[in-house]
Amino acid sequence: MAKITYITKAGEEIQLEANSGSLMELAVKHKVAGIDGDCGGVCSCATCHVHVAPEFYQKLDAPTEIESDMLEFDDNVTEYSRLCCQIPISAAVDGITVNVAN
Amino acid sequence: MDTTNLNCVIIGASHAGANCAMELRKQGWQGNIYLIDADAHLPYHRPPLSKEYLSKEEEGATKFKPLFALERYQEEEITLQLGLKVTKVIKKLKSVILSNGETIRYDKLVIATGASAIVPPIEGIESCRKVSVLRSAKDAIQIQQDFKTSTNKEVVIIGGGYIGLETAASLRKLGGNITVLEREERILARVAPIALADYFQELHTANGVKIHTGASAIKIIETDDAIEIQCNNRNVFTADVLIVGAGVKPNTFVAEEIGAEINNGIKVDENLQTTVEDVYAIGDVAQFYHPTYKEWMRLESVQNAVDQAKIVACNIIGNRQNYNAIPWFWSDQYHVKLQMVGLSKGFTYMVIRTEADKKDCFSIWYFKNDALIAVDAVNNGKAFVLGGKFIQNKILVDPLKIADNTIPFKPNNFIKTEINAH
Ligand SMILES: Cc1cc2nc3c(=O)[nH]c(=O)nc-3n(C[C@H](O)[C@H](O)[C@H](O)COP(=O)(O)OP(=O)(O)OC[C@H]3O[C@@H](n4cnc5c(N)ncnc54)[C@H](O)[C@@H]3O)c2cc1C
Ligand code: FES
């Protein structure tokens, strides 16, 4: 089980647990505001943009080129931006905190 | 508006309908929400049907990606009725009748019935057992099974549109011998400009898919172990699996019953209401006037379904909103991601931008007079996102700078300065 914390734009903190799927899927399942996942998780819509807590950002696999490209000019991009449909849930992300970007 | 005692009935629980139900709750709808679909599967994402789903070896219905988990419908108190068709709508009684005989009264009705795949009137097609369209989960299961059990993995696809080409790419990945028959002189004839169609034609050819243009199937003969497809140009093709991707027609039946105006889709106003009061239509089934592009249109895309779902929910609850979203779309084939934003129809000129250090990465920028109206991006998310912003904010960009790939890809490098603009 990985524990994941989402912080929405409005400042609401939502703690969830799961052991499979992606951070986007878990967020949609539990109605985390600001994560829509319109394209179903294929890097086509950018409706799943989050900022990953810096200490965790480095631990994740690097984003693919298409993901970085989608983020580069997106609103509210930071150096810790990720499309969370590209972050799979596993023990490796246990304890992660992400801020919803939009 | 006090909605406590009101019923909202949504016909069709796919991208448009399911999102509409969720959005209604978000907007504060207190009354009942009935979400009805003839499809028995938990509402799922359709785009993967021709992509991930078909290109993977394993099978099984569990792999369909749900739009929302079942618990979400329960938490939101949305009455999801799957595997039931709306067979009749009685306008006078403001009621819908389901295939199990149940009657549900509505105060607001949303028609989100989408579109169905067209089976063209080709001689012999009706009686052929091994022909599939690709619109639903059931179709995808059928294609996957037919392909798996076929001896020669010879697949013929009638129609070189996005669905036909995605299906070709997916089954090619699994080792199929694929032939695409396109009736027009080029693939993607209705949906993409020549430059893009040429690129995809080459991409498929390089991947070993045979594409025949100007090839119209006129007769289909099924034998014990194969299907023979005869074309207008006397060519004959043999297949063990035949797939038809010949476009869709909007499911307007329900709206016809209540006398709503129909013209290639159900006509809706800027609030997405049909010509019948309290009846709305959204998604693939809706024909609407786009204020930015100043044209009537019916779009077939996830973006349009989801965005209309959100707008219609606001209107139903009494918070008037006009629909004016910039359309976007994507298609995944092999290693290529195509992303389109805006609508290129009616463009007066276009420029192509390649990226100096990358192959298989370019974008096409379409202008109408001075205005940027659309961008098609191939493996280029930057062009897709930035192009979308430029279009949304009506920013004047310099086509010559876009076309010059020695100029780095940065917004400020493309925006026309005041002096240039005059
Ligand atoms: C294989 C495939 C790949 C695609 N790929 C992409 C893509 O990459 N990108 C993209 O943007 N778009 C893509 N699309 C298009 C996208 O899926 C559609 O635009 C979208 O599904 C439209 O949603 P909708 O809810 O309006 O209609 P639909 O998805 O067609 O849903 C309508 C629903 O209404 C139900 N229904 C109809 N009549 C009745 C009735 N009388 N009673 C009860 N239920 C009824 C149907 O069963 C159906 O479930 C693809 C479509 C397909 C089929
Ligand atoms: S869900 Fe569309 S990009 Fe992540």
Image (cartoon, coloured by chain):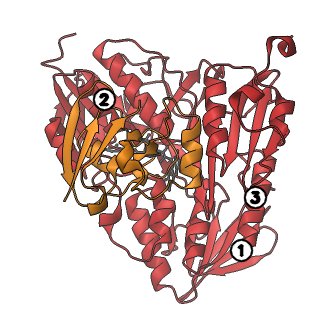
Residue B359, numbered label: 3
Q: Are marks 1 and 2 on the same chain?
A: yes
Q: Is residue B145 above or below residue B357?
A: below
Q: Is residue A43 above or below residue B222?
A: above
The answer to which image quadrant residue A80 occupies is top left
Q: Which residue is drawn at the image coordinates 57% and 74% (left, top)? A: B173
Question: Which percent across, then down, holds residue B419?
Answer: 85, 11
The kind of residue tagged 2 is: Glu
Chain B tint in image: red
Question: Which percent across, then down, holds residue A28?
Answer: 30, 43
Q: Say which element carries label 3.
A: loop
Question: Which percent across, then down, holds residue B130?
Answer: 50, 75
- Disc 1 crowd rating (10 Å Cα; few below 14, some 14-19, many 20+) is many
Q: Chain of mark 2?
A: B
Residue B23, numbered label: 2
Q: Earlier in the sequence, mark 1 or mark 2?
A: 2
Which residue corresponds to mark 1? B230
Task: Answer left or right for B157 relative to B19.
Answer: right
- Report if the beta carbon of the residue with label 2 is closer than 8 angstroms to ligand 1: no
Task: Answer left or right for B153 relative to B36.
Answer: right
Q: Say which element carries label 1.
A: strand
The kind of residue tagged 1 is: Gln
- Report if the beta carbon of the residue with label 3 is closer than 8 angstroms to ligand 1: no
Residue B98, numbered label: none
